[in-house]
Image (tube, rainbow, N blue to C red):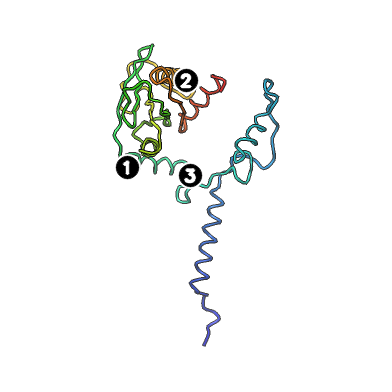
Amino acid sequence: MFDYGAPYSDPAFSGISLLGSMRKYGNRCRVQLVSAASGPSTADSTQGESIRTLLEADCPSLTDAKQACMKPTPFLRGGMLQSLYSTMRALKRDKYSDISYDRETKILSDGGTVSLDWYPARSPDSADARPIAIVMSGVGGSSYEYHIRCLSKSLGKEGAGYRVAVMNHRGMGRTPLTSPKIYNASDTCDFRDIVKYIQASYPDAPLLGVGFSLGANVLTKYLGEQGA
C-alpha cells in the first residue's frame, strides 16, 4: 500500500534537485565584471574613439554583461579560500609543470638584481627569431608557482614555437635583494630594462608579455607609458 506520508525518493528526481541546487549556488558565486547598463564613455582625443568603443570592437566579452563574468570554483568562493588553495598547490609537480629553468641574473643600473628563468634554455644565437614570452607573476610570486611552470612548459614545448623568460622581481624566487629599492605595482623601470635587454639580445625575435595579478598591472602600465 502506498504511503502518502513518505518522502518521495525517486533517484532521478533527487539527482535533478541536486543539480538545480548546485546551479543556484554557482550563480550566487558569479562575479559580474561589468554592469548591465552602459556607463559613460571616456573619449580618446587623439583617435576620436572611446575606450568602450575599442573594447566592443576588439574584446566584446569584456563589455557584454552576459559574458563579462567569472564563476569561481564553488568550493573556493571567497578570495581567502582561493589564496589558501593556491598556496597549498604552488609547489606541486606533475607532467604539466615539471620543468627545469635556465637562470640568468641581471644587475640593474641602481645595483638592484632581477632574474630571468628561461624555458627552454637560452639560445646562444642572437639571430634566433623565435618569439619570446616575458612572464611576470603576482605579488610575492615567482617562476616556481605552479601556474607559471604550467604556462612555461606549454609555451616552450616542442611544436609551440615560443621561448619563455619568466622575470623574477627583486628578492623573489631566490633572487638576491641587493638594493634598498624593492618592486611594486606602479614601478615599470625593472620591466622596461629587461625588455630592452632581451630586445638587444635577440633583435629579430617578436616579444609578447604575460602578467598575472600585480604582473598584469605592471605590464598594462608599461604598455600605456610606451603608447602601445
Residue farthest bottom in this picture = 1
The foreground one among 155 and 192 is: 155
Secondary structure type for disc 3: loop
Quarter in which the C terminus is drawn: top right
Give the CA distance from mark 1 to mark 3. Answer: 22 Å
| Image mark count | 3
The residue at 32%/26% (across/down) is: 122
The foreground one among 184 and 49 is: 49
Image coordinates of residue 42 in percent, x first then y, are 68, 27
Image coordinates of residue 134 in percent, x first then y, are 42, 28
Three-letter amino acid code at the position of disc 3: Gly
Three-letter amino acid code at the position of disc 1: Lys
* Residue behind mark 1: 92
Label 3 or label 2, whichever comes before in sequence order = 3
Q: Does 186 sit left or right of 37 as displayed?
A: left
Give the CA distance from mark 1 to mark 2. Answer: 30 Å
Which numbered circle lies on residue 78?
3
Which numbered circle lies on residue 188?
2
Label 1 or label 3, whichever comes before in sequence order = 3
**To which quarter of the image does residue 83 belong?**
top left
Q: How busy is the neighbourhood of tag 3: few (under 14 within 10 Å), some, or many (20 plus)?
A: few
**To which quarter of the image does residue 128 belong?**
top left
Label 1 or label 2, whichever comes before in sequence order = 1
Q: Is residue 196 above or below residue 50?
A: above
The residue at 48%/51% (across/down) is: 74
Give the CA distance from mark 3 to mark 2. Answer: 30 Å
Q: How busy is the neighbourhood of tag 1: few (under 14 within 10 Å), some, or many (20 plus)?
A: some
Three-letter amino acid code at the position of disc 2: Thr
